[in-house]
Amino acid sequence: MSLMQSPPGAETVIDGRRYLYFAGTAYLGLQGRADVIHAACEATRRYGVGSATNRAWFGTTPPLLDVERLAAELMGTEEAFYYVSGYVGHHILLAALAEQFQAVWIDERAHYSAQEAVRLSGRPAYAFQHRDPADLAARLKADLRPGQRPLVVSDGVFPVLGAIAPLAEYARVLREYPGAALSIDDAHGLGVLGPNGRGTLEHTGLIARGFNGGGDEAAASSDGPTLWLCGTLSKALGGFGGVIPGSRAFVERLKAASHYYDAASAVPVPAAAATARAIELVLAEPALRTRLWENALVVKRGLGGLGLATDDTPVPIVCLTIGSAENMQRIQQELMRQGIVIAYAGRYAGVGPAGALRLAVFSTHTAAMIQRLLDALRALL
């Protein structure tokens, strides 16, 4: 087990050594920003480490409300619900939507958290082939029973593969089914994709339909599925915990439908204060996102020049499958010896039996850092 001994960033200290770091999820480089850390320190002095109770009693603190206000501003919604972990986002969503669907279709490579939430929903569940609207359509025709309203569940951006779900194509498939719904976990899209950083729905052009109870839900349902999403604030957004933005009425429904408001401990106050400051920076500095897109493109073009297959999306994740598991482990270990960290995912949602190499790009990587990575990889291929 390796020990991280600094904030994650373009350069990160692991086991006492400073590395160029192309792993993890700190896409905008906010986890180590001095003003984000200062916000956490000031909140600790003022409020202590945690409220030691749940939100429904006395666990709501000003930093938590700041996060909800700023997350709603970022996403263009009335309200937002802030909870302790992005992992439970689909658990919370499916509890609130329980009366609106009778069966679930889920991408076969969706994250463990979504798979678990679907399994625990108690509804019949079916897997469809990864990012395949035609297979989704075929499975719906084969498995949907008369009178059932379907829910389709997917990641927005797949965390190791770096692929974007074809949400617009799913929405077209679901037009045939009155009352259908489409729900995504946008953990790796939130703050990264879209002109305003609103994630995969914005990137794919669906956000104008309204989501999470926003807009005219009845009208949206008549022309395709209702849209639902959850996200995390611990990745691109530089903080901690999960968030579901939406209409005021829907957020109240979320709080009533699960125990993550009235029984779970609130997010630790210093983490909430840091998260609020990080979202402020995302709102104030759109150049963080454009630099991230530019760096992702440079890395992907550079890898393409090495003969490695990549896409041209602004997603700051590159998944590489290069021969056997042993070969990929060799590459990962040799890069570490040279002071460069990338991840080898031997077992993770979506990867094949040999695993995959996963590169993460940050807005804080410099051109020289990227070139060093590309030169090192060229020598190892």
Image (spheres, rainbow, N blue to C red):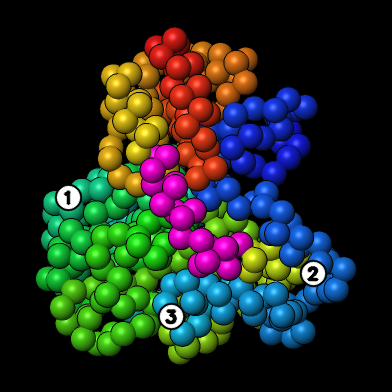
x and y percent of residue 99 in the render? 37, 81
Secondary element at tag 2: helix
Q: Report the span colored magenta.
A: 278-296
Quarter of the image where one finds residue 357: top left
Looking at the picture, tell me which residue is in the foreground, 12 or 159. 12
Looking at the picture, tell me which residue is in the foreground, 66 or 267. 66
Which residue is depicted at the point 70% across and 68% down?
273
x and y percent of residue 371 in the render? 46, 24
Mark 2 = which residue? Answer: 43
**Foreground: disc 1 or disc 2:** 2
Q: Amino acid at mark 3?
A: Thr
In magenta stretch: residue 287? yes
Label 2 near label 1: C-beta < 8 Å? no
Q: Is residue 363 left or right of residue 130?
A: right
Q: Amino acid at mark 1?
A: Asp
- Assess disc 3: are there few (<14), some (14-19) or many (≥20) residues with their C-alpha within 10 Å of its C-alpha: many
- Label ID, residue 77: 3
Q: Is residue 65 left or right of residue 209?
A: right
Magenta: predominant secondary structure element?
helix
Q: CA distance from mark 1 to mark 2?
A: 50 Å
